Image (cartoon, rainbow, N blue to C red):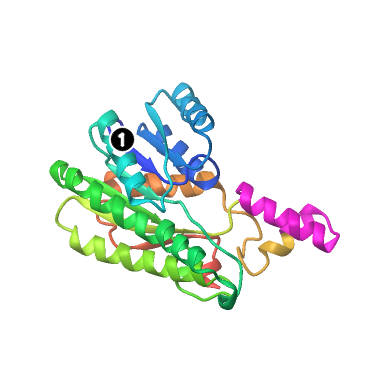
Amino acid sequence: MLQGKTALITGSQAGLGLGVARALAEAGANVILSGLCPPDEGKAVANDLSSQLSVASLFCRADLRSVEQIEAMMAAATDRFGSVDIIVNNAVLRHFKPVEAFETREWDASLAVNVSSAFHLARLGVPSMKAASWGRIINMASIYGVRGAQNRIDYVTTKSALLGMTRALAIELATSGITCNSVSPGTVPTEAILGRIAGLAAAAGTTQEKAEADYLIGRNPTQRFVSLEAVGAMVVFLCSEAARDINGANLPIDGGWSAA
């Protein structure tokens, strides 16, 4: 379905980003992975995708706090593939602390990674998308983009901003053949989430299974994790011809969390 297309997914050396990259590769797209892991590790992950799914891949180590590194990543992607047709802004930085405990550098880093990097990738990617009269920009948002949460001011603020950026780009690009949408996953079983739950289990002196069940209460009403494969399938659908008129939307995939 996506043969001949090239997708760049930020924060994709592991976790949700890698799950999305795998889904896009399974649909035939070439994939550019990015992250902050050592280059050899990232290249190994990219090579695994290539060998398993018969697509071309590239790993770019990029610190998304740096505009220069974002530009270098896009230049490397363009040199390798000619253009980037699909951009998935998945990378995220968050701090769990009250507002008075924030350091300026932490706040600035969250803004850079969670919001500014998405802007810069759109700025750099849109010209070639316009030339091809086709493109997809997909922002990984969150339920916290539409509601508040305690001790997560950077995450709530930046996810809210990302939804605004989605709407602005969708309207600006509406006649160009490019769509821009957001996907808001519920709780997914990433290494980071499972590690956090393990910490809660240890602190409470309970089992991982009990801690998982407690963690999902008040989040996913289905009382189970949203699978990485389901989120990846949603992204693939948004890249399909059938989704050409879905534009400026925020699509929850959260087992009903946003409806509760």
- Residue at the image position 36 percent from the left and 54 percent from the top: 117
The reply to whether residue 79 is visible in this rendering is yes
The reply to whether residue 143 is visible in this rendering is no
Residue 218 quadrant: bottom right
Disc 1 on helix, strand or loop?
helix
- Range covered by the magenta-colored residues: 189-212
- Residue at the image position 68 percent from the left and 56 percent from the top: 196
- Residue at the image position 34 percent from the left and 49 percent from the top: 238
Q: Position of residue 226 (x, y in %)?
A: 57, 53
Q: Residue furthest right?
A: 205
Which residue occupies the foreground of this view, 141 or 260?
Answer: 141
Q: Quadrant of the C terminus?
A: bottom right
- Figure check: 87 above or below 150: above
Q: Residue furthest front?
A: 104
Question: On the rendered structure, is 95 left or right of 57?
Answer: right
Q: Main secondary structure of the magenta part?
A: helix
Which residue occupies the foreground of this view, 139 or 219?
Answer: 139
- Figure check: 50 above or below 29: above
Q: Position of residue 7 (x, y in %)?
A: 34, 39
Question: On the rendered structure, is 202 left or right of 164?
Answer: right
The amino acid pointed to by label 1 is: Ala
State the count of labels: 1
Badge 1 is on which residue? 77
Which residue occupies the foreground of this view, 85 or 41?
Answer: 41
Residues packed near mark 1 inside 10 Å, few (<14), some (14 to 19) or many (20 plus)? many
- Residue at the image position 36 percent from the left and 41 percent from the top: 8
In the image, is residue 68 part of the stretch drawn in magenta?
no
Residue 50 quadrant: top left
Q: Quadrant of the N terminus?
A: top left
Q: Position of residue 135 (x, y in %)?
A: 24, 46
Q: Position of residue 40 (x, y in %)?
A: 51, 28
In the image, is residue 204 part of the stretch drawn in magenta?
yes
